[in-house]
Image: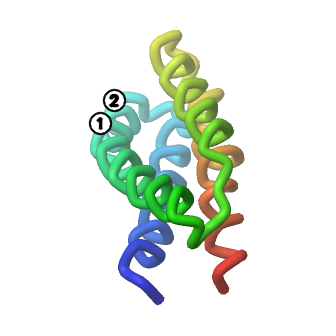
Amino acid sequence: MKELDKGILQLIEKMQNVADLLYQQKLKKGYQLFNDVLGELMTAADGLFAANAAGSIRLDPQRFISNLQDAMNAMESGDSVLLADILVYEISGQLQEYIDTIA
């Protein structure tokens, strides 16, 4: 498995950890971890977008960007449950779809 793929699997796990904290209303710790994960998410997105542009993978960049914007809006509005849902069901879901297509 390529390094990017391993990184994505780890990122999915980290987003689940963030979501778990947010669902438990451990907001301070959840948002701190989200800030850490956000940098990793942007790095992974850069790699995925480059691979998508090269034609080596299929990824809907507009959907991905829209999900990121929704996550940021949820965070800004203080809706921790919505943020957790977006992380688990939208962003992680899209990343898992990518992993499933290469498996």
Left or right side of 57 for 53: left
Left or right side of 12 for 86: right
Element type at mark 2: helix
Name the residue that disc number 2 marks: 28
Question: In this view of the protein, which residue sits in the foreground, 10 or 29?
Answer: 10
| Position in image of residue 38 (x %, y %) | 36, 41
Question: In this view of the protein, which residue sits in the foreground, 44 or 54?
Answer: 54
Residue 36 is drawn in which quadrant? top left
Q: CA distance from mark 1 to mark 2?
A: 6 Å
Left or right side of 89 for 69: left
Residue 80 is drawn in which quadrant? top right
Q: Residue at x 58, y 43 (%)?
A: 87
Q: Amino acid at mark 2?
A: Lys
Residue 50: assigned label: none
Question: In this view of the protein, which residue sits in the foreground, 16 or 53?
Answer: 53
Q: Residue at x 70, y 47 (%)?
A: 89
User: Which of pointers 1 and 2 indicates the residue nearer the eye?
Assistant: 1
When the figure is inspected, residue 9 is found, relative to residue 39, above or below; the finding is: below
Q: Amino acid at mark 1?
A: Gln
| Position in image of residue 17 (x %, y %) | 47, 54
* Label 1 close to label 2 by CB (< 8 Å): yes
Q: Residue at x 61, y 68 (%)?
A: 57
Q: Residue at x 61, y 54 (%)?
A: 92
| Position in image of residue 103 (x %, y %) | 66, 86
Name the residue that disc number 1 marks: 32
